[in-house]
Amino acid sequence: MDNRFDLESILGSLNPEKLRDLVKHLMENNSDVRHLTLEWYRKMHEISDGSLPDESPYHVDDELLMEYWSYASCIISEFNEYGGGDEEEEDEAYEWLNKISDLIEEGNISHDTKIAFMEEAFVEYDKYNSGYEDSLAEIFFELCQTDEEWRYLVTKLRRCPSDWRNKLVMDILRDNLQDDTAYLELRLKKLEYGNDYWELASFYDERGNMDKAIETAEMGLLEGKGRLTELFVFLFEHYAQKEDIPNAERIVHRALELKHDEKIMLDNLFGYYRSQGNYQKARDALLKSFTYAGRSEEYKEYQRIKTYLKNDDWSEVEPELFSSLRDRNMLAYLRICMDKGMKEEVISKLLAIPKAPDRWDYLNDFDKLALELKAEYPKEVIEYYWKKAYCNVPGGTRKTYRIAEGYLEIVRDIYVEILQDRPAWDNRFNSLKAEFKSRPAFLDEVKGL
C-alpha cells in the first residue's frame, strides 16, 4: 500500500480562499514565488481558454519588469559599492537584465512603468562603478518609443554630463527625435577626434548636404585626433566617384603624410586604377601597398601581386620581394619557398629556429609547415618537434606539459607510421621519461603515449 503523502490531492481539495492563503504564505517565505507566479499567469494567459480574467498584458508585464529589476538591482548596487563582485553574481545579474530585455521586446510595457523603471535604474547607472552601464544603456534605448520617453531619457543622461553621455544624447537627438537644431548645437561644441568629425559629416550626408559633409570631413583630416579611417575612405570614395583624380590622389598622399591608414588608402587607389583599366598606376599603387602590409598579410599580398602583374613585371620585381621577406618575415618567406619547391631551404630554416617554445599553441604556423614535410623529411621533422616538445618540460606546468604531449604525439606517429621503427620511439621516449622522472605531473600528461 502506498502511504506517501498525496500533496496533489491536498491542493486539489483547497477552496479558492485557502489557495490564496497558500500562495500568500509562499510569497512571504520565498521571494522567488512572486515572479514565478507572475510568469505562470502570463504563460497561462497566452494559452487561456477564457477561464482566466481578461487582464491586460500591460499589468502583468509591468509587474514582472519591476520584479526582475529588484533582483538585478540588488547585485548591481553591491557591485557599485565595491567596484565589482563575484563572477556567479555577475552572471546572475546579466540573466535578470536579459529577462528585462526579452520582456521589453514583447512591447507590453506601459509608459508609466517605463518612466518608473528608468527613475530607479538611473540611481545605479549614475554611480558608474558596477560594470553594467552599457547593458543598462541598451535597456534604456530598448524601452523608449515615444518622443516623450526619449526626451525623458535625454534629461536623465544630462544630469551627470560626460563625453559618453553626450554622445548618447546626440545619438538620440539625431536618430530618434530628429531634432537637427539641438543635435548640431551640441555636436559643434565637441569636435576633437576624427570620429567626432566623421559623425558630423555622416549627419550632413544623411540630410543630403554633401557640400557640408565634404567640408567637415576635410576639416577632420586637418584637425581631428585619433582614428581617421572613415574620413579618409569617405573622401576618397566621393572624389573617385566624381572622377576627381587629383583630389582622390591628394587624400591618399595625406594618409601617407600622416602615417595613418596608408595601406587601406593605397589599396583603394589600386582598386580605382584597376577599375579604370590603368595598369601602370594600379601596379605602382599595389607595389607601394605591399610596403605597408602587416606581417600576417605579407604572404597573401605577395600572391596578390603575383596574380595581378604581367609576367615581365613580375619577373622584374619578384626577386626583391622574395629577398625582403627573407630578411623580415621568415614565415612568409618559408611559405613562398614551399610554393617554389625549395623544401631543403624550409627544413634548414625550421631546424635553425631558436628553442624558445610557443607555450600556447602546439600547432603554430611553423609547425604546420613542418607537418607538410614529414613524409619527405621524417628524421628532420622528428628533430624539429622533439626540440619543441623538450623546451616545454624543464620548469614547466601542466599547461606546457600538455603542449609537449602534443608534440611528442606527432614524433611518435612519424617514428611508427612513416619510419616504421617503434623500438626507436620506445627507446627515446623512455629515456625522456627517465630524465624527468622527478616530474610526476609531466609523466601523468604523457602516460597515454
Image (cartoon, helix red, strand yellow):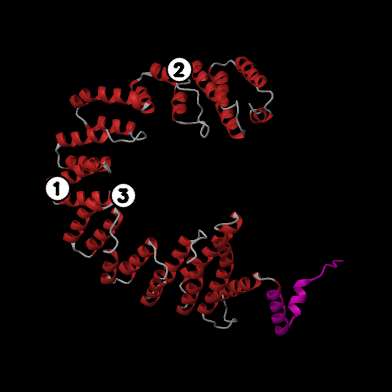
Instruction: Specify the segment rendered in magenta.
Output: 1-28
Q: Cβ–Cβ below 8 Å for labels 1 and 2?
A: no
State the predominant SS element of the stretch in magenta: helix
Q: CA distance from mark 3 to mark 1?
A: 21 Å
Q: Cβ–Cβ below 8 Å for labels 2 and 3?
A: no
Q: Residue at 47% of width from left, 22% of height from top?
A: 354
Q: Earlier in the sequence, mark 3 or mark 1?
A: 3
In this rendering, is residue 299 above or below 23? Answer: above
User: Percent x, y for residue 415?
Assistant: 56, 18
Q: Of circles 2 and 3, which is in front? A: 3
Among all residues in the image, which is located at the extreme right? 1
The residue that disc 2 covers is 376
Residue type at the position of mark 1: Asn
The residue that disc 1 covers is 247
Question: Residue 289 versus residue 162: which sits nearer the camera?
Answer: 162
Classify 10 Å Cα crowding around label 1: few (below 14), some (14-19), many (20 and above).
some
Q: Is residue 60 magenta?
A: no
Q: Secondary structure at mark 2?
A: loop
User: Percent x, y for residue 214?
Assistant: 19, 56
Q: Which mark is residue 227?
A: 3
Q: Earlier in the sequence, mark 1 or mark 2?
A: 1
Question: Residue 131 versus residue 222: which sits nearer the camera?
Answer: 222
Q: Residue at 16% of width from left, 60% of height from top?
A: 211
Q: Is residue 26 magenta?
A: yes
